[in-house]
Image (spheres, rainbow, N blue to C red):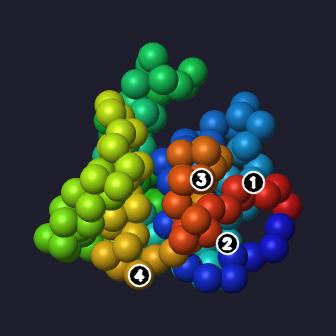
Amino acid sequence: MTMPAEPGIVDTNVLIYALDTAAPQHAAALALLNAARADAATLFVTSQILCEFYSVMTNPRRVARPRTAAEALTVLSDMLTFLHVLPVPASTIDRLLDLLRRRPVTGSDVFDLHIIAAMQANNIGRIYTFNTADFAAFPDLAVVTPAAP
C-alpha cells in the first residue's frame, strides 16, 4: 500500500472494517490504521466519528460480532493512541449551514456534511472512506479508498 501523502480524516466505515476480519475491506482498513500506528501517516477523526463507531460496534443489528461497552471502550482507547481528534470549533456550524444551503440533504446524510464542515474548519482536505459516493459531490475533497497492502 502506498502510504498517505498528506494527513486525512478517517471515516467511520474504515474503523469498522478494521475490526471486522470477515469484511473484504478489512486488510485495506487495517493497513491504513497500522500506518498511523507506526507514525507513517497522520490520521484524524472527529468526536462524531468516534460516537458513530462506538454506536455501530456495540449494535447487534449492525455488526455480526458486537462489542460490549467495556470492549468498545478498550478499542477506542487504543485507537486514540495513534488517531488525532480534530477540534470542532463553533465555526463548524456556520460551515454546515452553508453546505446544507448548497446541497440540501435529508436524514442521516447530514452527518457526512458535518464531517466535511469539520474538515473545512481544520483545513483537512482528504478523507479515507469506503463510501466514496457520499463525498463525490465535493470536488475540492480528496476522497481516497484505502487499498490493501
**Closer mark to the observer between disc 4 and disc 2:** 4
Is there a contact, CB below 8 Å, between mark 3 and mark 1? no
N-terminal of the two: label 4 or label 2? 2
Total marks placed: 4
Residue found at the far front of this picture: 102
Give amino acid for label 4: Asn
Circle 1 — which element? helix
Crowding at label 2, few (<14), some or many (≥20) Cα neighbours within 10 Å?
A: some
Picture layout, residue 139 above or below residue 19? below
N-terminal of the two: label 1 or label 2? 1
Q: Which residue is mark 4?
A: 123
Q: At x 71% / y 44%, what residue is drawn?
A: 26
Q: Residue 35 got which mark?
A: 2
Left or right of 65 in this view: 84: left
Q: Residue 136 got which mark?
A: 3
Give amino acid for label 2: Ala
Locate residue 27, reporting x and y percent: 76, 50
Q: Residue 114 got which mark?
A: none
